Amino acid sequence: MDGFSRHIYPKNVIKCSITRYNVASRRIPPIPHTIMTRISTIIFIMAAAVSAILSGCIEDGFTSSPSDLPSFSVDTLKMGTVITEEGTATYRFTVRNRHSKGLNISSITIGGENAGMFRMNVDGMSGQGFSNVEIRAKDSIYIFVEATLPSNGQDIPEEVRASIDFITNGVAQEVVLSAFGQDVTRYKAHIMTEDTDWNAGRPYRITDSLVVAENATLTLRPGTVIYFHDKSSLIVHGTLISHGTPSQPVVLTGDRQGNVVGQISFDLMSNQWEGVTFTPSSKGNTLEGTIIKNTTSGVFLDHSDMSMTNCVLRNSGGNAMNSIHSDLTAVGCEFAEAAKSVLRLEGGQASISHCTLANYYLFSGIRDASLSLAHITPDETEDGTDPSEPLLSATIDNTIIFGNGSTISHGDLTGTQVYLRRCLLKNRGTDDDNFINCVWDSNPLYYTEREKYIFDYRLKENSPAIGAADPSMTLGGPGSTDRYGLPRGAAPDLGAYVYMPPEEESN
């Protein structure tokens, strides 16, 4: 073969030529035809493979059809209720290209008269507007949104709306942005040295701490709401009186709103603020219709006294309620969701009636029994406990103790001054001198579904707790109704809640 050997290949295959060389006037002998054929075949296969790889890396192009548009994971991005003049949490939604070709979104902007209150981040870039945002075929991008809402001068939340506007292939689309701005009355490291009333209307917001000084009384009127910032606390050296009602409960909670992730709302999250501490100088405390939730250490009653009626203590990173050598009366109360115990009694006196103790805590393993008892026998020692302190004396009546984990820290109460009378218990067991006329190994049939993040401790139809309480141990006064205002009646139910038959569906 003289000169370049010529072969015909497909257009997308790299052409190759072989030439003869003279080296020091020595002629290289011709390559046999069979070898040349094999080389050509190998080159053809290699070139075809390279072409396939290169063609796989080339974009299929962008669609310009007005019918090919992005889709969104939400129509309205709901950012919940946020405190005005402060930045919100970050919310996000997904923009998807479900088509076989790429999309070029020519414009993404925040629109509406409130546009300046919102900020966005598109696929890692921050700004108020973007041009020519590309999404590959069958791919998606995230858009993150934050807001800072100005004060509105209102006691109740006021909705603020804007939109994120998209133009793709000449077609306009939008995702609505919705946030409710809540004005608050702010206190930081505040000490109350005189009697004070707080009322419904504009919520109170605490950063650092709220301290009720000795000999001062803080009274919370029906409907009062107090938001506590991260690591803040309420410390009572004096007296706390809280008068919630079925229609206007008093609420003490964290200041984060909306969902932390997926379907899990901040309303379910513990460790948002420290909790409430009643010190030994605190006396005469009364809580009615009061909800205390989302704490790190719950309610801590330290050598003090407390009367509680129709209260809810839930979602604590420690104990929901911890009473140490105190005088505690709780009627119609729910103690629920804690990393440790939902109710811990160490020494002192306790009268618990028509309460529900339930623990389906989400965020860690449950470390202690639902009802934890300490300093109940003479030979029991506790770190930091004065052995001269009187042992625990407690009656627990018409109460449900049922949930994940163990039920009671002391299975054998023989010889103690702790008595459970007509209680529904998760455990298998039999009555004795301390467990009296109890309902053993029975499921109360709550509406709670932990997997769906539903925590509702009212009773379903056919619950063994319905009508099973001992009316002679049902206390009168505010405890004669549950926290929804339903009367306990002559044949009361066990636990905090009165059974209400489900409403019949209308045809």
Image (cartoon, rainbow, N blue to C red):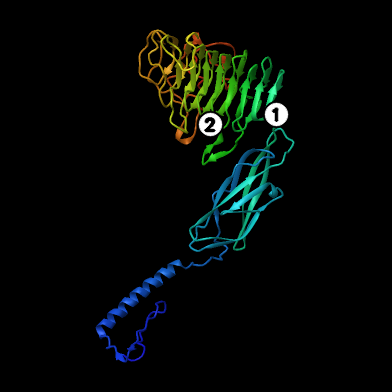
> Which residue sits at x=39%, y=71%?
50
How far across and down, in percent of the image, does residue 143 sit?
57, 51
Q: Return the x and y of residue 380 as percentages of the image width and height.
A: 42, 13
Instruction: Locate the N terminus by quadrant.
Output: bottom left
Front label number (2 vs 1)? 2
Q: Residues within 10 Å of mark 1 (few under 14, many from 20)?
A: some
Q: 58 and 397: which one is in front?
A: 58
Q: Which residue is painted at 60% across and 46% down in the image? A: 76
Crowd class of label 2 (few under 14; some 14 to 19; many from 20; radius 10 Å) = many
Q: Is residue 456 above or below residue 323?
A: below
Residue 279: image quadrant is top right
Q: Residue furthest right?
A: 153
Q: Vertical placement of 332 versus 110: above or below?
A: above
Q: Earlier in the sequence, mark 2 or mark 1?
A: 1
Left-right relation of 171 to 354 = right
Q: Which amino acid, mark 2?
A: Ser
Q: Is residue 73 above or below residue 350?
A: below
SS state under label 1: loop
| Figure quadrant of residue 33 | bottom left
Q: Residue at x 52, y 24 (%)?
A: 320
Q: Position of residue 103 (x, y in %)?
A: 54, 62
Amino acid residing under circle 1: Gly
Q: Which mark is residue 37?
A: none
**Residue beneath disc 1:** 201
- Image position of 63 with respect to 214: above or below: below
Q: Which residue is mark 2?
A: 270
